[in-house]
Image: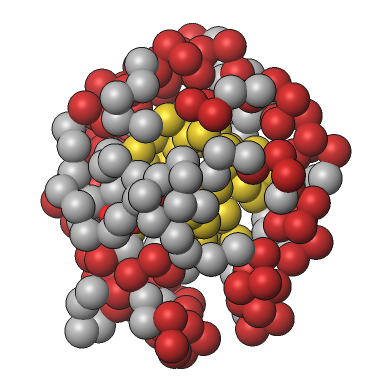
Amino acid sequence: MGALRRQLRIAPSILSADFACLGAAIDSVSQETDWLHVDVMDGHFVPNLTIGPPVVAAIRKHCDAYLDCHLMMTNPGQYLEAFAAAGANSVSVHVEVGDTAALIDKCRRLGLGVGLAVNPETPIEACEDFLGQIDVLLVMSVHPGFGGQKFMPVALDKIAWAAGHAARSSLDLSIEVDGGIDASNAALTCAAGASIFVAGSAIFGRPDPAAAAAEIRRSAELAALREEAR
Ligand code: DX5
Ligand code: ZN
């Protein structure tokens, strides 16, 4: 396969891993992991609870994967230092929680990569003013809170809008898509402009997680090659 202009990344979401054997689950996909996606839920911004900085610190001790922490939290600002100290590489905060400029600034000061996440029902224009200040736009393709949901095609228009905006304004912005991603819709989202593909159940819910991640990668790569040949 020829060299792609766009760097594609597969980000397995540990939300669907067996938390009782988390280290082994992470190891099972390490060959196909570009970023490891860590879903942090506070029981308030979303109706579910997961994990926080202590687990990030334990993962950090276990492996050197790039830890992409998705903060589904009402008050992410109160925890950014803790995530940085735990060894997170990047965090994504939700545009819906507000105070976005200050949160971006704080992430930068802590040396964290900065993502801005946007829910399916939130207009993408809510992110417009921040696209030049972030590294990653995280487009949700499910309502956040639970793994194993069905991909929502509304994400495709948002990805295409953001990719167009980034290209026109020469922004160094990667678009990450999260929720219900599998090999078939990875191609669609890649064609729309996504380059980071979060997948939980389509990886950890399969008997061979590494093979499942490789299949998602192949499908996205083929779509990117087709786009680049157009
Ligand atoms: C949803 C999370 C996602 C999701 C990924 O709230 O942010 O990371 O769990 O899991 P799948 O791929 O199963 O939708
Ligand atoms: Zn996520």
In the image, residue 228 sits, relative to residue 142, either above or below, namely above
The image quarter containing residue 213 is bottom left
| Left or right: residue 56 compared with residue 18 | right
Residue at image x 57%, y 54%? 69
Horizontally, residue 17 falls left or right of residue 104, namely: left
Residue 82 is situated, as x and y percent measured from the top left of the image, at 76, 57
Task: Examine the rendered structure and indicate whether residue 149 appears above or below residue 56.
Answer: above
Instruction: Report the front residue among 137 and 147.
Output: 147
Number of disc labels: 0
Can residue 46 be seen in the rendering of this structure?
Answer: yes
Q: Quadrant of the N terminus?
A: bottom left
> In which quarter of the view is residue 66 placed?
bottom right
Horizontal relation, residue 61 to residue 191: left or right: right
Relative to residue 181, is residue 49 depicted above or below? below
Residue 10 coordinates in the image, percent (x, y)? 41, 58
Q: Quadrant of the C terminus?
A: top left
Could you tell me which residue is drawn at 35 percent across and 45 percent down?
A: 144
Residue 168 position in % (x across, y down): 49, 10
Res 223 seen here: no
**Residue drawn at the location 28% of the way across and 59% of the way down:** 147
Residue 15 occupies quadrant:
bottom left
Location of residue 200 in the rendering, given as x and y in whole percent from the top left corner: 32, 63
Q: Name the colouring of the figure.
A: secondary structure
- Who's the residue at 39% across and 56% down the image? 48
Choose between 161 and 45: the one closer to the eye: 45
